[in-house]
Image (cartoon, rainbow, N blue to C red):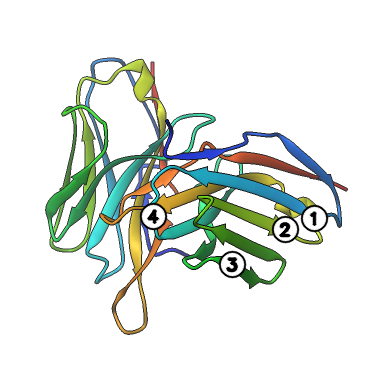
Amino acid sequence: ETGVTQSPTHLIKTRGQQVTLRCSSQSGHNTVSWYQQALGQGPQFIFQYYREEENGRGNFPPRFSGLQFPNYSSELNVNALELDDSALYLCASIAKSGRGANTGELFFGEGSRLTVL
Amino acid sequence: QKEVEQNSGPLSVPEGAIASLNCTYSDRVSQSFFWYRQYSGKSPELIMSIYSNGDKEDGRFTAQLNKASQYVSLLIRDSQPSDSATYLCAVRNTGNQFYFGTGTSLTVIP
């Protein structure tokens, strides 16, 4: 149990549509990041949020956007879907130690598998 | 040049043998290294983290780090069929962004 939950688990969209993926993490996990994992590849960093502000972004176009909310939940939005956007989208948070410090270890949710037709 | 490189495999070992997985990274200032296991259709799960040169052991798993050579490895002793999975090497940068290799597929043959 990582304390990170994602929804939906699977979804199918068509090219050009828009999608919103959701993530919730444990209270106090104030850093959340999103990764895209295409088939046969490792996860690729999309962006990261800290205290509701984006504080890091990977090599993804602006049609990938996100939000983090005060309750530590987060969204990933993808506009104008392309076939190559088909992938497993992973939400992750940095674990906290018993003293509340970041352990530096990244824990993933179960992922949302997006298929674009 | 990729940030993190792994042999994609597949790697097959008999049950009870030692499986050896290797990883190299390009950013010389990296300080934090991780191994994740990913079963087919599932998300990655953290199995080991290592921050200092040398070996770190946790049960049947041993992570080895050599910063001078920019090399990280994972040894799995007494391999079990349940160890069959893809193993991902990851490196964390100073901005808490993680870079992953493409993974090594391991099959443990009963």
Discs 1 and 2 lie in a common subunit: yes
Discs 3 and 4 lie in a common subunit: yes
State which tag comes first along the sequence, 3 or 1: 1
In the rendered structure, are the residues bearing label 1 and label 2 in contact, judged by CB atoms less than 8 Å apart? yes
- Specify the subunit that label 2 lies on: B
Task: Residue A107: give x, y in percent of width and height.
Answer: 42, 59
| Eye-nearest disc, 3 or 1 | 3
| Eye-nearest disc, 2 or 4 | 4
As shown in the figure, which amino acid type bears the numbered disc 4?
Ser
Q: Which residue is label 3 attached to? A: B54
- Give me the C-alpha separation between circle 1 and circle 2: 5 Å
Residue B38 vs residue B31, the one in the foreground: B31
Q: Which residue is label 4 attached to? A: B30
- Give me the C-alpha separation between circle 3 and circle 2: 16 Å
In the rendered image, the vertical position of residue A29 relative to residue A68, given as above or below: below
State which tag comes first along the sequence, 2 or 4: 4
Q: Secondary structure at mark 4?
A: loop
Question: Which image quarter is the C terminus of chain A in?
Answer: top left
Task: Residue B52: give x, y in percent of width and height.
Answer: 49, 68
| Eye-nearest disc, 4 or 1 | 4
State which tag comes first along the sequence, 3 or 4: 4
Q: Which residue is label 2 attached to? A: B76
Q: Residues within 10 Å of mark 1 (few under 14, many from 20)?
A: some
Q: Which residue is label 1 attached to? A: B18
As shown in the figure, which amino acid type bears the numbered disc 2?
Ile
Q: Secondary structure at mark 3?
A: strand
As shown in the figure, which amino acid type bears the numbered disc 3?
Gly
Discs 3 and 1 lie in a common subunit: yes
In the rendered image, the vertical position of residue B55 relative to residue A50, given as above or below: below
Q: Residue at x 67, y 64 (%)?
A: B61
Discs 3 and 2 lie in a common subunit: yes
- Specify the subunit that label 4 lies on: B
